[in-house]
Each structure stands twice: as structure tokens, then as C-alpha cells.
């Protein structure tokens, strides 16, 4: 869908939102700015809070919350006068802005969601919607001279490859969903929030690593009681949190480090596959869990990737392909603003994006 671009009588500003499985962020940002302003954060009214509800009902709740919060922001002093709205959405979508799935938002199967059209009609301003990792990739596009792969490790796992000025995703929304690559074909493989089993996101995301830590603590109670996780959790594996786990890995705790290392093996396989398939040699990692663990995340991943080997590369070349992105949660907001600038600069924007 094509939307009109309003005339501007002064400096432009955008209202940008990043809808994730755990948190909805909304802020204001000027084109070219390095950071958003007046960011509001609220818990997403979806699967993270209401796991007992069916997917279709959760989808309706998520959409209503997004529309309501954007309306409120546009009506506030912080959002007044915004020339456009950009939304980074956690789910695969078509080029026209129809969301095909929301694994971390509403879980299982629900109707395709024409979110770009819904928001354009409700808000009355130009709206561009893109997959959240597509948007985040735009944050790094100007700084990265060579093709790169952006991978987020948070509630789930997603990726996008940026090359020659564009994200490599089909118009129908296929591609960029490495989190749903099945790495464990067993019938009893861990479930994924999309309804499948054995997917990378269910095993190596923040939620996947947390589940692995709790299971490891139950399986080896003596080792657990001696590790750094036992104190914060009060000796109860069910009380381990992602924050506890990240802190323990940062301080070098052997138990927590081994849990993470085991979970990083399938992620190393995914990086290996992408490299072997298309030759990308730059991998940036963002997302709440990866950033919380910090440099240890990429160093441990680099060790596992080096063990696997990358065809055509010497061992010493492999760890240098991996790096952390910026240590904040503004990737989708900043990237969405830069994507808006590119989209609206040509005189019209699409109501969608992948």
C-alpha cells in the first residue's frame, strides 16, 4: 500500500516502535539521530504474559495494545507533530506489511495480520512496518562496508543478511528466520513457541538457555548447589533467571558456562551454514540475552564455531567474524528511523516491508 508523505515545515521527527515478545518500546527520533528520545517501555500483552490463551485471542490483544499505545504517544507532547510512524514487528511479514506469524507474540497459528493497513487507518499518518530484525539491520547498514548477518538472541532467535543496500528476504516474507531452522529432528525435541519442535530458537535463545539451565540443575543437584546460580535462585532450579545466568557466565562460573556452551553448538552450526551457503564473513549479535552475557557470548560461540571449522578459512580467521552489536535495546527504533528516512525520501512509502 502506498501512503502520502505530508509536507514538512520544519525538522522532521518520527515516532518509532519496536514490538518484541517481551517488551513494547515506543520513542521519538529525528532522521539521522544516534538515539531515540522519550522512550516508553511496557510489557507486551502477548504470549509472555498469557500463555494459557489461544493464539488468535493473543493476536487481537497485541494489535490492540500496539494501536492504543501508538495513539497515546502521538497525542502526547513527545509525539506531537511526528511526520510518520515506523513499527519494527517481531514476526515474518510480506512486502505489503502482512504479518505471517508471531511465534514470540502469540505463539501458534493465527490468521495473517495486515498490520500496516490496520495502523495506517487507525493512526492517520504514514506508517511503515518491517520485521524487527530487518529494521535493526538498517542501524548497521551505513557502518558495515561488507555484507553482514545480524542475529538477535533474546526471547527467540532471528537473523537477516544485509547486502548491496537491501535485506535478503523474499517479497512473500520467506527468509531471515534461522530461529525456526530445525536442528534436532527427534520426535522428543524441545518445543518451539511456533508449535514446532527442535528449532534453533527453542534451544539457543534466552528462553532456551534458561530452560536448559533449569534442567541441568535438576539433573545435577550437587553441581548446581556449588555454582553461582544456586545463591540467587535460593537453591531452587525453577527460580533461576536469565539475569542470574548471564551474570554467572560473565564471572566465569563453570556450571553456567557449560550450559551456555552446550546451547551455543546449534547456533554455531547455523552460522556455519550461512557462511558455507552464501559466504558472509561478518556476524553481529544483538538481543537482550546476548548483550547481557556480553563479550563472553561471542568468545564462547567463536570457540564452538572454530571446533566445527568453516570451509576455506583458517582457524585463526573464524573468531574474528563474530562481534556484538551496540549494548542497548534501541536497535529496532534507530534502524526503523533510518529505514523510514530511506523509504520516505523517494516521495512515498509503502505500508509494509520485510
Image (cartoon, rainbow, N blue to C red):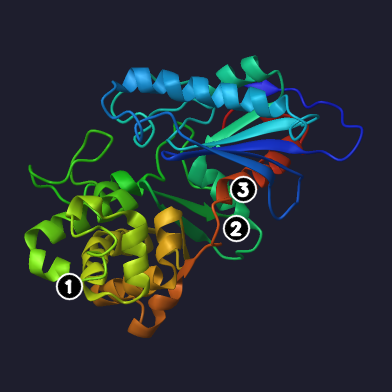
Residue 3, quarter of picture: top right
Query: Which callout, 2 or 3, points at the residue further toward the start of the chain?
Result: 2
Residue indicated by mark 3 = 335
Q: Is residue 234 left or right of residue 72?
A: left
Foreground: disc 1 or disc 3: 1
Q: Is residue 212 left or right of residue 327?
A: left
| Residue appearing at x 57%, y 51% in the figure | 331
Q: What is the number of the mark on residue 140? A: 2
| Residue appearing at x 51%, y 42% in the figure | 132
Query: Which callout, 1 or 3, points at the residue further toward the start of the chain?
Result: 1
Structural distance between the alpha carbons of marks 2 and 1: 41 Å
Q: Position of residue 340 (x, y in %)?
A: 68, 39
352 or 294: which is nearer to us?
Answer: 294
Q: Is residue 251 above or below residue 154?
A: below
Q: Please, what secondary structure does the residue beneath circle 1 have? A: loop
Disc 1 crowd rating (10 Å Cα; few below 14, some 14-19, many 20+) is some
| Residue appearing at x 72%, y 31% in the figure | 84
Disc 2 crowd rating (10 Å Cα; few below 14, some 14-19, many 20+) is many
Amino acid at each position: 500500500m502506498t501512503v502520502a508523505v505530508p509536507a514538512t515545515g520544519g525538522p522532521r521527527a518520527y515516532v518509532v516502535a519496536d514490538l518484541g515478545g517481551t517488551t513494547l518500546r515506543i520513542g521519538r527520533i529525528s532522521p539521522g539521530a544516534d538515539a531515540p528520545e522519550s522512550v516508553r517501555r511496557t510489557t507486551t500483552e502477548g504470549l509472555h504474559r498469557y500463555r494459557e490463551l489461544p493464539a488468535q485471542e493473543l493476536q487481537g490483544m497485541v494489535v490492540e495494545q500496539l494501536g492504543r499505545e501508538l495513539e497515546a504517544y502521538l497525542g502526547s507532547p513527545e509525539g506531537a507533530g511526528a511526520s510518520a510512524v515506523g513499527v519494527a514487528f517481531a514476526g515474518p511479514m510480506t512486502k505489503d506489511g502482512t504479518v505471517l506469524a508471531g511465534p514470540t507474540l502469540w505463539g501458534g497459528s493465527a490468521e495473517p495480520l495486515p498490520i500496516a493497513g490496520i495502523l495506517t487507518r487507525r493512526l492517520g499518518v504514514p506508517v511503515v512496518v518491517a520485521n524487527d530484525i530487518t529494521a535493526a539491520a538498517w542501524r548497521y547498514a551505513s557502518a558495515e562496508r561488507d555484507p553482514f548477518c545480524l542475529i538477535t538472541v533474546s526471547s527467540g532467535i532471528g537473523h537477516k543478511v544485509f547486502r548491496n543496500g537491501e535485506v535478503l528476504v523474499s517479497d512473500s516474507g520467506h527468509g531471515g528466520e534461522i530461529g525456526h531452522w530445525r536442528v534436532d529432528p527427534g520426535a522428543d525435541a524441545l518445543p518451539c513457541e511456533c508449535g514446532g519442535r527442535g528449532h534453533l530458537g527453542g534451544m539457543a535463545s534466552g528462553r532456551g538457555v534458561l530452560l536448559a539451565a533449569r534442567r541441568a540443575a535438576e539433573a545435577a543437584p550437587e553441581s548446581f548447589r556449588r555454582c553461582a546460580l544456586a545463591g540467587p535462585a535460593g537453591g531452587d532450579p525453577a527460580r533461576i533467571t536469565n539475569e542470574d545466568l548471564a551474570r554467572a557466565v560473565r564471572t566465569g562460573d563453570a556450571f553456567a558456562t557449560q550450559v551456555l556452551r552446550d546451547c551455543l553448538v546449534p547456533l554455531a552450526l547455523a552460522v556455519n551454514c550461512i557462511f558455507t551457503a552464501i559466504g558472509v564473513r561478518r556476524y553481529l549479535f544483538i538481543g537482550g540475552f546476548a548483550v547481557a552475557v556480553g563479550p563472553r557470548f561471542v568468545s564462547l560461540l567463536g570457540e564452538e564455531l572454530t571446533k566445527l571449522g568453516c570451509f576455506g578459512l583458517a582457524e585463526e580467521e573464524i573468531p574474528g567474524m563474530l562481534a556484538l552489536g551496540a549494548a542497548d535495546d534501541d536497535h529496532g527504533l534507530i534502524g526503523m528511523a533510518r529505514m523510514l528516512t530511506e523509504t520516505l525520501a523517494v516521495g512515498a512509502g509503502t505500508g509494509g516491508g520485510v
